[in-house]
Image (cartoon, rainbow, N blue to C red):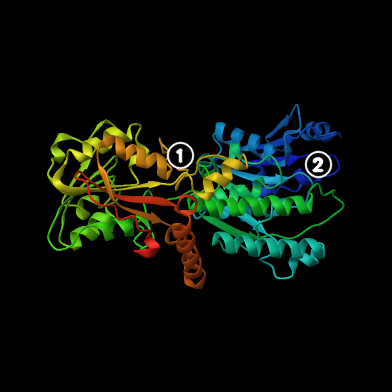
Amino acid sequence: MKVGVLVVAYNAESTLHWVLDRIPATLRRDLAEVLVMDDHSTDDTFAVAHRYANGELPLTIVRHERNLGYGGNQKAGYRYAIDHGWDVVVLLHGDGQYAPEKMPDLLAPILDGDADAVFGSRMLDRGGARRGGMPMYKFVGNRILTTAQNAITGAGLSEWHSGYRAYRTAALADLDFVGNSDDFDFDTEIILQLLGADKRIVEVPIPTYYGDEISRVNGIAYAKDIMVDTIRHRLGEAGFGRGELGHKREAYEYKPSPNSSHGIVLELVPDGRPLRILDVGCGPGWVAAELRRRGHHVTGVDITTTDGVSDRTDRFFEADVEGGLPDEVGDGFDVIIAADVIEHVRDPDALLADLAGRMEPSGMILASVPNFGHWYPRARTAAGLFDYDQRGILDRTHMRFFTRRSFRRTVAHTGLTTTAERYAGLPLDVLGVDGVIGRSAGAVDRLITRLWPTMFAYQFVVRLEAAPHSIDAIPLANA
């Protein structure tokens, strides 16, 4: 494999020669390249590197025209490694804080095919960090932050804060690291992206060394930044944010709780006889599977074919409903479900009219839309933080936003009549909030949703029929 070493250096004139000298002789002849990235040092780091270029190492020296920052320097180095066909890149600091002699240990798991990333950990050798001179305040801070980050992410790393690492470059190429921080929290963001991409991480013990090098890390600011990044990752896995550090993996999740849109839709489907049901935007078909279990015949439609959806529906059609339903779907349905789909099309009126033409004269449409008047998008907009999420009300695939008033107006334009209106609360089941906290949060959410639905209802769920009926506008909490 083509192995290269990225040496990040800033004002390292007194240590760089020593660091390069310590790269093991057994590795020196096998390395494809040693790239010294001088981050616009104000001392003679660049000249020291040039004086070392004597043929003993395949040395390439780059000096940035401006200071890119610790993270920015790494970005440039990783782009170089990827563009020049390296298979493995080892990150080595030019200040001598990490032992070059341990480089073979970092490389071994990757060369053996057992890892995508290997981190040198100063915490695997119990007591080694303090024996190596790590100040007590740094040791305690390291342990507190690592424990918190493991708890938030579910990882089990012994240390999140070592800068001695080796990466398989193909794994780096899968990550959007170019958009990461240019500061010292870049290392944390790389870990979070590796976790989010299910890359294999291995730790190996390394010695701790603290000399007279100058620390350029503002500890308080660093702790704040890495905790913000870690929380962003956790929220990203729940669907919030754009997904740079943590992303929602499931394309569609089943929300069967009574306070959710799926639970309400299932409650509104009439019992008593088998029905012909059309589930538009059925996703993997979890709602369809439950309806079939109750004895109904279900036709599913979705823009993509998800594994297993054909087994959960009686018939399935892959189609983009933006242009209307395919003719072969048919008509004469007793119930048509449009759960979390109307907001994804440019012309909701046309879609609802198409659905209305597919149902029996005595049939119904059960539709749900997110509430843009909910406190969450209101608060983000008022704070000037409006942006799209991966899921939820601010889902980046939404083409239209609805409040209760605007959705009622859309329904009125179709000539349909709303005969039931329900209010779904926060999707606590999807967010993984359970136990005592989940039950307490659910009770509070149901109460405030009933008292002020336009502010606290997460979604509106309606039953639409062709003939006029008296409206049953009962919040879920009273249902």
**Counting other residues with Cα less than 10 Å from the Cα at mark 1, is it few (<14), some (14-19), or many (20 or more)?**
some
Three-letter amino acid code at the position of disc 2:
His
Q: Quadrant of the C terminus?
A: bottom left
121 sits left or right of 256 in the view: right
Q: Hey, which quadrant is residue 425 in on the image?
A: bottom left
**SS for tag 2?**
helix
Three-letter amino acid code at the position of disc 1:
Arg
User: Which residue shows up at 59% across the image and 64% down it?
Assistant: 151
Label number found at residue 87 = none
Q: Which residue is mark 1?
A: 396
Residue 393 % position (x, y): 45, 46
User: Which residue shows up at 15% across the image and 57% down it?
Assistant: 296
272 sits left or right of 149 in the view: left
Q: Hey, which quadrant is residue 324 in on the image?
A: top left
Q: Judge by depth and name the residue closer to the eye, 473 or 117.
A: 473
Q: Earlier in the sequence, mark 1 or mark 2?
A: 2
**In the current view of this chain or complex, which residue is farthest to the top?**
65
Residue 78 % position (x, y): 61, 38
Q: Which residue is mark 2?
A: 17
